[in-house]
Image: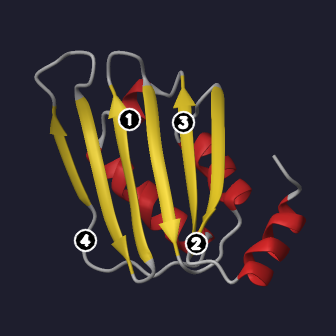
Amino acid sequence: MENIKDFKERYEKEKVWGLLTSVDLYHCNPELIRDADAIRRYVDELCQIIDMKKFGDTLVVNFGEDERVAGFSMTQLIETSLISGHFANLTNAAYLDIFSCKYYDPQVAADFTQKFFQAKEMTIHYILRK
C-alpha cells in the first residue's frame, strides 16, 4: 500500500468520486460482535473520528440460516455515502466497508475499528473510486 500522505494527495489531485476502505477483522471479541448496542456505539464513535455525519439511524439486524454466515449485519447512511458491515459468529470475524465522497484517513478508520472490536488480526484495503 502506498504512503497515506501520498494517497491523500492522489485523492485531491485526481478529483475522485470517493474513497472505499474495506476492513477485515479476525479473532474479534465475541461479546462485542454479538452486541447490537456495541455495534451502534462503534458507528457513532467512528463517525466522530472520521468526521462523518450520520443520516438516520444505524440499522443492525441479526440473521443467517447458514451457520457459516450467521451474525449481525449493519448499515449506516452518512451524508456522503455509507458504512456497512457483517459480523460472523462462527469465526468471530468482521467485514466492514466505509465509502464516502468526502476524504477521511483510511488507516485511522481501520485502526479504530480493530481496536474497538479487539481484533487480533486485520486486513485493510482502500481504493479511490472515479
Q: Give the mark toward the camera: 4 or 3.
A: 3
Residue behind mark 1: 33
Q: Amino acid at mark 2?
A: Lys
Among numbered discs 4 and 3, the one appearing first in the sequence: 3
Q: Residue at x 49, y 65 (%)?
A: 99
Residue behind mark 3: 24
User: CA separation, marks 2 and 1?
Assistant: 33 Å
Task: Say few, some or many: other residues with alpha carbon within 10 Å of mark 1 (under 14 / 14 to 19 / 20 or more).
Answer: many
User: CA separation, marks 1 and 3?
Assistant: 13 Å
Residue 56: give x, y in percent of width and height.
25, 77
Q: Give the mark toward the camera: 3 or 2.
A: 2
User: CA separation, marks 4 and 3?
Assistant: 23 Å
Among numbered discs 2 and 1, the one appearing first in the sequence: 1
Residue 41: give x, y in percent of width and height.
41, 58
Residue 96: give x, y in percent of width and height.
46, 46
Is the residue 85 above or below the residue 120 in the image? Answer: below
Residue behind mark 2: 130
Asked whether disc 3 touches disc 2, contact meaning CB atoms under 8 Å apart, the reply is no
Q: Give the mark toward the camera: 1 or 3.
A: 3
Among numbered discs 3 and 2, the one appearing first in the sequence: 3
User: CA separation, marks 4 and 1?
Assistant: 19 Å
